Image (spheres, grey):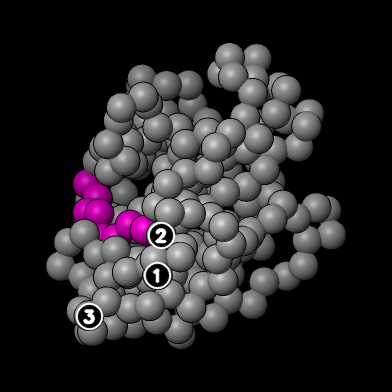
């Protein structure tokens, strides 16, 4: 998996370079496919053991802003939509489902998918607390991230979701990359930094035209 670690209360600020070649896998009419090296493909393409499988959604609008919402239980923390993958569920199906469940949004086009998993650890206290809810104790969550373009009207956004799950968010905003990095929880910042590094150029309207495979410059560990 990508070498990301948990950051504590003194989490450093992030300087994200979105000028480098993205390594995501285009799904629609986009560009820049990624072909991992043989030494890293197994660690990138398969989720690590002991982590809960999860999907994350980076939803952006035509103005190049990203959807974020504040948590009901921690209103100072803003996040992008994410959620667990059901047993046997396709990852793209899970991403669409989670987006609808948490935001009510169904008018969204999947643009790209990161070809590798990004993981973060739970604190021991959080791991124990969540194990009572899930029935399994996980080390943390490992995520597959999707870039989606919002194609609907803002009236569609409803934080009650589609009514199938308990509401998680209280307010929502379209944010810049910098705003999201400043407003999210420290534990998520390493993952968010990598997501923004990979998707940032497209969100800002600087998508590349090279459809050839691109070799990753991201530092990977086994």
Above or below: residue 119 compared with residue 4: above
In terms of secondary structure, where does tag 2 sit? Answer: helix
Q: Where are the magenta residues, as a range?
A: 107-115
Q: Which residue is mark 3?
A: 212
In terms of secondary structure, where does tag 3 sit? Answer: loop
In percent of the image, x 25 and y 54: which residue is there? 110
In terms of secondary structure, where does tag 1 sit? Answer: loop
On whether residue 60 falls in the magenta region, the answer is no
On whether residue 111 falls in the magenta region, the answer is yes
Contact check, label 2 and label 1, Cβ < 8 Å:
yes
Q: Which residue is mark 1?
A: 37
Mark 1 Cα-neighbour bin, 10 Å: few <14, some 14–19, many ≥20: few
The earlier-in-sequence mark between 1 and 3 is 1
Q: Main secondary structure of the magenta part?
A: strand
Q: Residue 41 shows which numbered tag?
A: 2
Q: CA distance from mark 2 to mark 1?
A: 6 Å
Residue farthest to the front, as pictured: 39
The earlier-in-sequence mark between 2 and 3 is 2
Mark 2 Cα-neighbour bin, 10 Å: few <14, some 14–19, many ≥20: some
Q: Position of residue 142 (x, y in %)?
A: 52, 43
Above or below: residue 119 compared with residue 31: above
In percent of the image, x 72 and y 30: which residue is there? 126
Q: CA distance from mark 1 to mark 3?
A: 15 Å
């Amino acid at each position: 998996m990508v070498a990301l670690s948990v950051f504590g209360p003194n989490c450093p600020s992030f300087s994200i370079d979105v000028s480098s070649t993205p390594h995501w896998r285009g799904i629609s009419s986009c560009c820049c496919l990624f072909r991992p090296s043989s030494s890293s493909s197994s660690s990138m393409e398969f989720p690590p053991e002991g982590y809960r499988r999860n999907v994350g959604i980076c939803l952006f609008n035509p103005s190049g802003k990203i959807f974020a919402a504040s948590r009901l239980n921690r209103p100072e923390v803003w996040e992008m939509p994410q959620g667990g993958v059901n047993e046997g569920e396709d990852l793209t199906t899970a991403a669409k489902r989670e987006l609808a469940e948490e935001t009510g949004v169904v008018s969204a086009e999947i643009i790209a998918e990161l070809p590798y998993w990004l993981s973060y650890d739970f604190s021991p206290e959080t791991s124990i607390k969540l194990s009572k809810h899930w029935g399994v104790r996980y080390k943390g969550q490992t995520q597959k991230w999707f870039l989606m373009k919002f194609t609907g009207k803002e009236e569609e956004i409803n934080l009650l979701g589609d009514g199938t799950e308990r509401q998680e968010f209280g307010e929502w905003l379209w944010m810049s990359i910098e705003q999201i990095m400043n407003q999210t929880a420290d534990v998520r910042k390493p993952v968010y930094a990598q997501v923004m590094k990979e998707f940032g150029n497209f969100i800002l309207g600087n998508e590349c035209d090279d459809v050839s495979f691109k070799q990753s410059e991201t530092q990977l560990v086994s």
